[in-house]
Image (cartoon, rainbow, N blue to C red):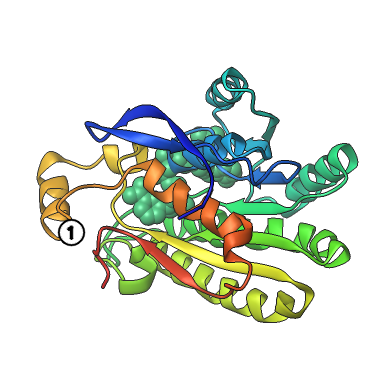
């Protein structure tokens, strides 16, 4: 996926896997929302390994975000943990203003923060619908809206929105979540069209079934049947998603915009 030096080893999914340590993001400032755990944590660590200064956004899990910072510092990465509820427009404005004041620019924005409140449509409460839309879809609007002037001014930038295969195919029991993720694809494509002529790339990554806290809550039976529906017959890892995000954040993807890259072991094809 990248042409840099690859070295180091880490155990994931029971197999030794190489860690991408090219430094092509050196000097770039990246904001990753929802980076205190799961996929966001992997994205933050991967971008930091490639040299980016990473702002690790969290909402409730401050301790976990600080642990991510410690992990980052252990290999020479740098950045800081920034608390903010992305569903709050004003709070996002304060967070981005503070980041721009301190670092002067943002080059990479990864809208990863997301929640689920699964229920069948006949039982879904208004609060379950609204909270998922507010975090997953409006949260991305909020950060993009507050940083778009900065991207336009510098005539460069990479925006990567973490959607889901549920937003591509729909999923029973997830009307709220699928709507938010399908909306995120529409947001991605529209903003990509608006910003393309200024050299700003806006893409989405659609993970399939990834081993994190979000899927950890599912029963063994549900997991088994989900894995059975994946052509590659395994859950993905946070690292699988993070590598795709790093590709879209780097210069190898400079001519790619408005796309949805499924990282799903073939689930949605
Ligand atoms: P986790 O539940 O493991 O982590 C969610 C992250 O989002 C946490 O860091 C959490 O921070 C943060 N977050 C939640 N609400 C907010 C908020 N209002 N403001 C700021 N941060 C918030 O989820 P995953 O890592 O599994 O998922 C990450 C993304 O990937 C989500 O967008 C999800 O929809 C998507 N995805 C996941 C899949 C999977 O199989 N796991 C499949 C497809 C897509 P805190 O703990 O501090 O609140």
54 sits left or right of 123 in the view: right
**Coordinates of residue 132 in the picture (x, y in percent):** 48, 56
**Toward the viewer: 131 or 38?**
38
**84 and 164: which is toward the camera:** 164
Residue 149, compared with residue 34, is above or below; it is: below
**Which residue corresponds to the image point at 22% horizontal and 42% vertical from the top-left?**
218
Would residue 242 be seen by someone viewing this image from the given angle? yes
| Callout count | 1
Does 32 sit above or below residue 267?
above
Q: Residue at x 66, y 74 (%)?
A: 191
Quadrant showing the C terminus: bottom left
Left or right of residue 131: residue 153: right
Q: Which residue is mark 1?
A: 230
The residue shown at (45%, 32%) is 7
Residue 136 in the image, given as x and y percentages of width and height:
52, 57
Residue drawn at the location 58% of the way across and 41% of the way down: 47
- Asked whether 256 or 35 is in front, the reply is 256
Q: Residues within 10 Å of mark 1 (few under 14, many from 20)?
A: some
Q: Quadrant of residue 153?
A: bottom right
Position in image of residue 148 (x %, y %): 78, 64
Left or right position of 164 against 92: left
């Amino acid at each position: 996926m990248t042409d840099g030096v690859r070295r180091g080893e880490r155990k994931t999914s029971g197999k030794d896997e190489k860690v991408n340590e090219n430094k092509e993001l050196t000097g770039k400032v990246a904001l990753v929302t929802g980076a205190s755990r799961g996929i966001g944590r992997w994205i933050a660590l991967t971008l930091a390994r490639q040299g980016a200064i990473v702002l690790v956004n969290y909402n409730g899990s401050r301790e976990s975000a600080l642990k991510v910072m410690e992990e980052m510092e252990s290999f020479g990465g740098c950045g800081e943990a920034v608390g903010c509820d992305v569903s709050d427009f004003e709070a996002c404005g304060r967070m981005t203003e503070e980041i721009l004041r301190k670092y002067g620019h943002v080059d990479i924005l990864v809208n990863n923060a997301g929640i689920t409140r699964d229920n069948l449509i006949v039982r879904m409460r208004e609060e379950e619908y609204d909270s998922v839309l507010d975090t997953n879809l409006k949260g991305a609007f909020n950060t993009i809206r507050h940083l778009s002037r900065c991207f336009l001014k510098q005539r460069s930038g990479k925006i990567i929105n973490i959607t889901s295969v549920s937003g591509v195919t729909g999923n029973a029991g997830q009307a709220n979540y699928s709507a938010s993720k399908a909306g995120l694809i529409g947001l991605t494509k529209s903003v990509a069209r608006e910003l393309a002529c200024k050299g700003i790339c806006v893409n989405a990554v659609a993970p399939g079934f990834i081993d994190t806290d979000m899927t950890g809550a599912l029963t063994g039976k549900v997991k088994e049947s989900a894995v059975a529906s994946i052509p590659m017959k395994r859950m993905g890892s946070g690292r699988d998603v993070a590598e795709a995000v790093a590709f879209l954040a780097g210069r190898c993807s400079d001519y790619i915009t408005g796309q949805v890259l499924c990282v799903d072991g073939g689930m949605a094809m």
